[in-house]
Structure formats: structure tokens, C-alpha cells
Image (cartoon, grey):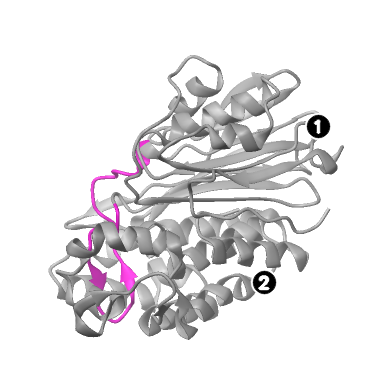
Amino acid sequence: MADEPRAAEVGRDILVAGGSAADAAVAMYFALSATLPSAASLGAGGVCLVHNSQTRKAEAIVFPSTPAGSVATPTAVRGMTLLHVRHGQARWEALVAPGERLARDGASVSRALARDLQAGVSQIGLDPAARRIYEKSGGVAVGEGDPLVQRDLASTLAAVRARGGVDFFQGVFARQLAESVQSVGGGLTQQNLRESLASVVEPIKAPVGDHTAYFAPPPFAGPVTQAAFTGQGIAGSGAYSGGEAGFAAMDRRANAVACTVGMGQLFGARKVAPGTGIMMGAPGGGSNPLMGPILISNPNTGDVMLVGVASGGSAAPAAVGTVARQVMREGIPLSPALAATGGVQIGMIACPRGMRENRTLCQLGVDPKSYGLALTAGR
């Protein structure tokens, strides 16, 4: 599942082709960079929770964005590279290529991106490179159903596909990106890109009977999600503000990934690095306290029970924790639990008996007020 439908379809296709949950997550991110750059561009940072069914362990891969003058140092490509190295099975090229095609061929603007453009067009309209991408004739922003061709972004994704993610933060492309950002007054340097980090760390843990719930560590919002899941926090609600995107996957082998990425605010720094097609993130780490994915698995059997993500505002971390509690601890079916949420957008895959033990009982969905999509790769 993902916060934008084309990205969810890309993830489904990777799973159908035999890829792992990590492969699907990586492919969904690169698709989102083309279809939802308001929240998940190549300028983003974020966090993923990962369950490995063979080792029966879960981990957090953290890649928080860091300030670089008037923009944020992009870290999500580094995070996806680490996720693929540790848990991927498919070829890297096959995971980047769908996003590249969406950028090059011009995917239709989805309802999700159209909503963000309607809210943010006045800010990004001040940037000449952004206007060339997001405006059509007459100075009007592209709208739902309009083709969105991003040739510069397609070229960037082609380089990432061909030369690997490492080139993005310490290769030829890293130099090009730093020079591009500097040409419009940004402070990003090659040193910023080289020193940006993606790390494997211990997630926050909470027992759920024989299972364990995992949450993102600080500076992310795991403590808030945990409090809502254990019934000690307030239920999440509030208006959608944008700037973050969630995506998650489970595979037949009971591997699972839940990721949230963010731009610091809607459309990040509201600047596109000329010649790259990358909407840069805003400095200050504004998205970090808004990102709180959740994952539940059984460390004894290696089975996985739940992945959940939420995005779109300050209420998101508590909202996903609340829905997970209702489904896993209170026995409420996923669909009505999602329908009761408000403001932010939530996606979840829940298998109360376990993906391996009884996948026929699995439920998946997105809240009906969001514009995301949840798909199955088959029972």
C-alpha cells in the first residue's frame, strides 16, 4: 500500500514478480518520487521498520534529513540503498525503473498530488524550475488527470538506476546536485551528501501477548505511536497538512516493511534543483516528529501480523497507533477502524493470526478519506 495509487501498483507488481517486501518498498519510494513529489521527492528523509522472517528480528532503518542552508540534505536514496542491500532480492535496476518511466512518460496527476498542488501552488510558483514542471499554459497549475512529464527527474532516476544509489551521495551525481542547488542560492555541498547517514538501529518495542510491536526511535514519532497503541495517549485527529508519505508491504515469506518519508513541509523548500527535477526538502527536520510507522511480528515464529503508516499532519503518529490498537487488541475489523479516523491518511495491512499462519484472515486498506491505495498480490 502507498499514499498514491500508481506507487501502490508498482509495489504490487514487484511482489507478483517474486520480489521481497523490501524490494516492493524501494520501488514504491522511487515511484512516489515521480507521482507525489510534494511529500516523497528524492529530496526527502525518513524511517523504515523492517521485519526479517528468517532471522525473526525487526530493525529500524533511519535516514533523517539534516539542514544544508536553505534546503535539507536528501537522505531517502541513501535509506533505500541500505534497505535494498540488507533485505532486497530483486535487481536494483528493476526497482528504480518504474519510477523513471513514470517521470519520463508523464503519469497523469493523481488526486493525491492535485490536492497538494492546490494547497501549495502559490509557494512553488515562486521558483522558476518548479513552474516549468507544475504549470501548464497560461500559468495554471496542472490538475488531476493532466500529464506530468518530468524529463530532468527521469534523467536523475536513470543515473540512480544505472550507477546505483551510492552515486547520489558520493559520486558524479552528488557533485552535479550540489552545484545545482548552489546555483540557486542553496547551501548543499558534496560534503553534506557524503556525510548524510542511513543507519540500522534498535526500534522501540512493546509486548502484545506473544507478539512484539515495533515503533520508530527518536527523533521520529515512535513514542507517540506507542502511547496511542497502548492506550496511554490521545487518539489522533486533525486537519491534513501534507509533506509526508507512507508506504508498506508484506510478502508471502512474512517479511515486512513500513516506511514514512517527509519533506519538512508540503513541497519541502519549494525549490527544484535545476537540471535534476528534484524538489528539495525544507531544512529543520520538521517531518521527523510526524513520522511514526508501526510493525507487529512474532519473534518466536518469525511471522508478521501488522504494518501501518500514517501521514499528513501532527495527528498521524497517534492515529496509526490507535487504529493498530483497535485491530490487534480490541478485535475491531480494519475497515471501520480506518473509517473512524479523521484528517490524516492511514494505510495498514493486518493479519491477526499471522501472514504465514493464516493469510486468508489478512485485511488491508487505506482510510476512505485518503487518496492512497492498498492492493494484494494474491492469496
Q: How many marks?
A: 2
Amino acid type of disc 1? Answer: Arg
Q: Amino acid at mark 2?
A: Arg
Q: Is residue 268 visible?
A: no
The image shows residue 188 at horizontal and vertical percentages of: 23, 63
Look at 28% across and 50% down and name the residue there: 265
The answer to whether 65 appears left or right of 368 in the picture is left
Measuring from the top left, give residue 175's x and y in whole percent. 30, 75
Residue at the outermost top position: 232
Q: Is residue 120 above or below residue 153?
A: above
The residue that disc 2 covers is 91
The boundaries of the magenta stretch are 266-289
Would you place residue 145 above or below residue 267 in this image? below
x, y percent for residue 158 = 49, 81
Instruction: Inspect the magenta stretch and tell me whether residue 282 lies in it.
Output: yes
Is label 2 in a helix, a strand or a loop? loop
